[in-house]
Image (cartoon, rainbow, N blue to C red):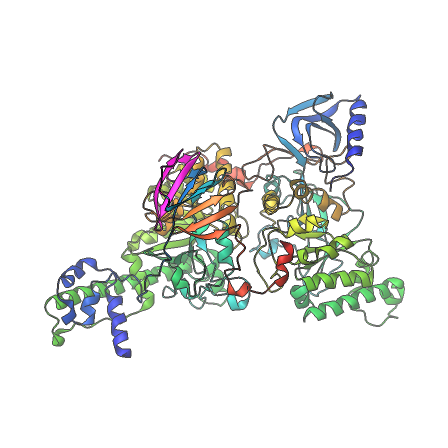
Amino acid sequence: MKHELSSFRRALLGVATLSLAACGARSQNTSELPAECSLLATEGRRAWPVAAPEQPAQQQAVLLVGGNVMTAAGDIFEPGWVHFAQGRVVAVGQGDPPEVGDDIDVINVAGKWVTPGLIDTHSHLGVYATPSVQATSEGNEATSPITAQVEAVHSVWPQDPGFERAIAGGITSLMILPGSANLIGGRGFTMKLRAGAQNAEELRFPGAPETLKMACGENPRRVYGSRGQMPSTRMGSIAVVRQAWTDAVEYRRKSDEYREELASWCEAGAAEDARPDAPAIDLRSETLAGVLRGEILPQVHCYRADEMLEQIAIAEDFGYRIRSFHHAVEAYKIRDVLGSYPIAVSTWADWWGFKLEAWDSIVENAALLHESGAVPVIHSDSAIGIQRLNQEAAKAWAAGIEAGIELDQNDAIRWITWNAAWALGIEDETGSLEPGKMADVVVWSAHPLSVYASAEQVYVDGVLQFDHTADIAPWSDFELGLWPQQEDGQ
Amino acid sequence: MIRNTTTAFVFLSSLAASTALAHDVCYEGATVFPVSAPEFIGTVCTTGERISGLYPLGESFAADRVVSADGAVITPGLIEASTSLGLIEIWAVPETNDTSDGGDDIRAAFRALDGIDPSSALLPIARSGGITSAIATPTGGLIAGQVAFFDLVDTGELLVTEGERGVMVASLGAEGGDAAGGSRGTAMLRYREIFTDARIYLADPTAFDRNQRRELGASWLDLQALGPVLGGESIVVFGADAAQDLRAGLRLAEEFDLSIAFIGGADAWSIRDELSAAQTPVIVNPFRNLPESFDALGSREDNAALLDAAGVPVILTSGEAHNVRTLRQIAGNAVRAGMPYNSALAAVTLRPAQLAGVDATHGSLEVGKYANLVVWSGDPFESTTHVDHIVIRGAEASLRSHQTELLERYRTPVAP
C-alpha cells in the first residue's frame, strides 16, 4: 500500500501538465495500463493531489436593485442592478432592473454602492495569525534561503480571527504568501473567504494557478548573513538564486525526458521489461520546474528598481515570467519596463521608510504605473490593512489625481479587484462584475473610496458570507467565549 | 469636548469689534472648526506666530494678505499623541534610532527632547497629512522616559513647548512584566520600589550624595526625574491593554497619588465607567480590532466610540512615525466606528494638547494661541482630501519633501 502511494505520487510529479504527451495515453484503454500511464492524463499542477474543495451552493438567486454599481470592468451605474444565481453573475445593468420571477430574492440597496469582492494579493493571514505569538509564527521556513518545496497552505490556520475581519472589509479572495526571509520562500495559497472551514484546503480558490513567493533585497541577506551563512549580501543572493534556477533547468530537462519516454512506453503497451527509469523526485526542484514550464506564477518581493530589473534579467535568462512584483516601492522609476511586459505591481498606498530599501516610496506609485500601462495593485501585507483596502486605494488614487494623472473611479476599484485577480491568474473567474464570473459581491454603506464606507453585505460565490446586521458568533473557534462581557458594549 | 458655546459666541463678537489693526494673513470663507467652539463659516486670521482673529461670514476684518479658502475646511493642526517622529529616520538602520535608552528598566531621566532631529526627512511628509505638532515618545524599559511636544516647523529649529506638566511614559501588562524581568507582579513591585525610593531620595538628596542611604532601586537621575510624577504634577502614560492592567494602573495612581493616562487600552471599553469616573485619558488606535496578543483579546474597533460616549477623554493615535500622516484616516475610521465627528477631531487636536499640558498655546483655534492650522480641500478625514495650506507658528510651512522631489524627477510621462 505504501509503495503504491509512493509510485502514484512519483508518477504524478513526473507528469505535471504534459498535456500534449498525455493525449496519446488518454485515447487508450487506460484501465489495463500501469498507474503512471493513467496519470499522464491528469493536469497535475501540484506535488500531490488535492481534491477540489466543496463549494457551498448558492440556493437563492439574488437581484440587487437601486444601488450604485461599480463593475470594475469600466462601468459605473448610478443606479444599477446586479443579478446572480448559482454562484455566478447572471447580468449587470443600468437603471431599472429586468422583470424577474418570484423565485429571485430582490434586495433593495438604494443609496448603497456595489462592487466586486476585493482581492488582496499579499496576505499572511493564517500563517502569521493573531494572536501574534511564537506559536502562530508560521510564515517563514527560515532554515534555508531556497525552500521552494514548502507551501503556505500547510501553515494556514483556518481559525485565524483575521479572516473574518478581512471579509468584513469587503475581501472575498486573497493570496497567502510565505514571508520574505528566503530568496525562494515557497508556494503561495490563493483562497476564498468563507465561514466554517476545518482545513485551509477547503478554502482553496478552485482552479487558481499555483504561485511561488520569491524575495530579494534586505530581508534574506539579513536573515542568513546574521548566521554567517550565504547570502549575506545582494551579490550573494543573486548567486544563490541563479544556482537554484540552473539546477532547476537540468532537473526539468530530465523530468521532461522521462515524461516523453513514459508517454511512448505507455503508447507502446507498457511492457514491464521496458519500463523507463523514473528520475529521483525532489520537491524543491519540482516547484521550480513548474515555474519554468509557466504553470506557477512567480510573486517577487522587491523594493528597489535596480533589483527588479535584476530579477527580470534572471527570469529572462532562465525563461520564466514574473507575474507580480510585491511592495515594489520604486516601481514607478521603471514603469516603462513594467508596463511593456506587463508585470503586475502589488504595492502599498503610502508605506515607506521603515528600511533603507523603502526610502524612495511615493504615494503616486500606483497611479504612475497605471499611466504607463502596467498593472498596479494595492495590497495589504497586514491584518489591519486588509480590512480597508478600499481606503488604501483611495489614498493612492487621490495622490495620482493631485499629480495630474488621468484616473477615474473605476481605476481605483480595479487596483483592488481586477488587477489583483490578474496578478493571481484568476481574472477570468473573479475581479469584476461581469456575466459568468463568480458572484463575489460587496454592498457598501457609502462610496467605497470614502473613509466612512463599510462593507455591509459580502457575497462569496453568491452566498451571503458576511452581513453587518447579523448578530452571529465569531467565525473563529478561538474567539468563542473569550470575552463574555463583549455584549455590554453593544 | 466643546467649551461653553455662549462664551464662544460673545468672544467672537467682541473680537470683531476690536480689530483696529490689520492682521498679517486671513484665510477667508472656509468652514472653520475651532474645536473649542462650534464650527462656523468664516475666516481665520493670523498675526506673527499667533491666531489673531476669527470672523463669522459677513463680519469685516482687515488684513495685509487675504487667502481665499472658499469651500475649504480649516481645523487646528493635527497633533500626534504618541510617535517616534523626530527620533527615528529608518527603523532598520539602528544608528538612526533615538527612541530609547538602552540598559536598565528605569529610564525616567531619559528625555525624547535630546534625540529629536528637527530636520528629519519625515517631518515634511508628516506635514502633508496636516500634522503640525507631535508628542515624541520614548520607548522601551519599564519606565521609558519623558516625552517632548514639538512643532513641525520647516526651518530646522527645534521648537519644543514645555507643558504645564511633564509626561512620563511607562508600561504595564506583559510588556511591563517583561521589562521588569519577570511577570506582571514583578512590574508592580518594581513600581512600588521605585516610587518609594524616589520619595526617600527626594526627601534628602544630600544624604544620598554622602552615601548615607541604603542602596536605592534606580540611578539618582531617574529618582530625581520621578519627583514631579509623585503627587501628580507630571502625568504618567501607562502602556496597558488588558482590563486587569488598566486597573493595576488605577491602583498605582491611588497608592502614589499619580496623575495617569493610558495608551493602548484594548480592553478600556470594558471598564469605561471607572475610567470616566477617574477622568483618565486613554490614547487609542481605532484600527486595532484583532485579538493581536493575549493582553489585547478585547480589542474592538468601536473602543474609542464607546469610551467617548461614556465621557472618557479619548485621544487618537496612529502609532506611526513615517506614516503619522495617516492620523486623519485613523480619525475617519473612529467616526466610521461610531465616534461623533467633533469628538474625533478633538481627539487629534485639543485633547493631545491637554494631555501634554500645552493647551494654553495649542490644540484649538483661539485668539492668542499659536497659529497652527490646516486649510483642507474638504473633509480632513477623507483620503481624497488634501492639504491646501499648513500654517505652523504663523508661517506657511513647506510641503516639499524627499517624496515630492522624487515625484518631480520621475513625473515626466513615459512613452507607452
* Residue B33 point in image, percent of width and height: 68, 34
Q: Position of residue A95 (x, y in %)?
A: 40, 33
Where residue B160 sits, quadrant-wise, is top right
Res. B402 image quadrant: top right
Q: Residue at x 35, y 42 (%)?
A: A101
Residue numbers of the magenta segment? A73-101
Q: Position of residue A419 (x, y in %)?
A: 39, 45
**Left or right: A459 in relation to B209:** left
Is A26 on the left or on the right of A360, as rendered? left
Specify the quadrant that holds the N terminus of chain A.
bottom left
Q: Magenta stretch: residue A279 in it?
A: no
- The quadrant in which residue A301 appears is bottom left
Residue B141 visible to the viewer: no
Q: Does the stretch in magenta take in A90?
A: yes
Horizontal and vertical percent position of residue B234? 79, 53
Is B204 situated above or below A58?
Answer: below
Q: Nearer the viewer, residue A391 or B334?
A: B334
Picture layout, residue A109 above or below residue B395: below
A413 or B80: nearer the eye? Answer: A413
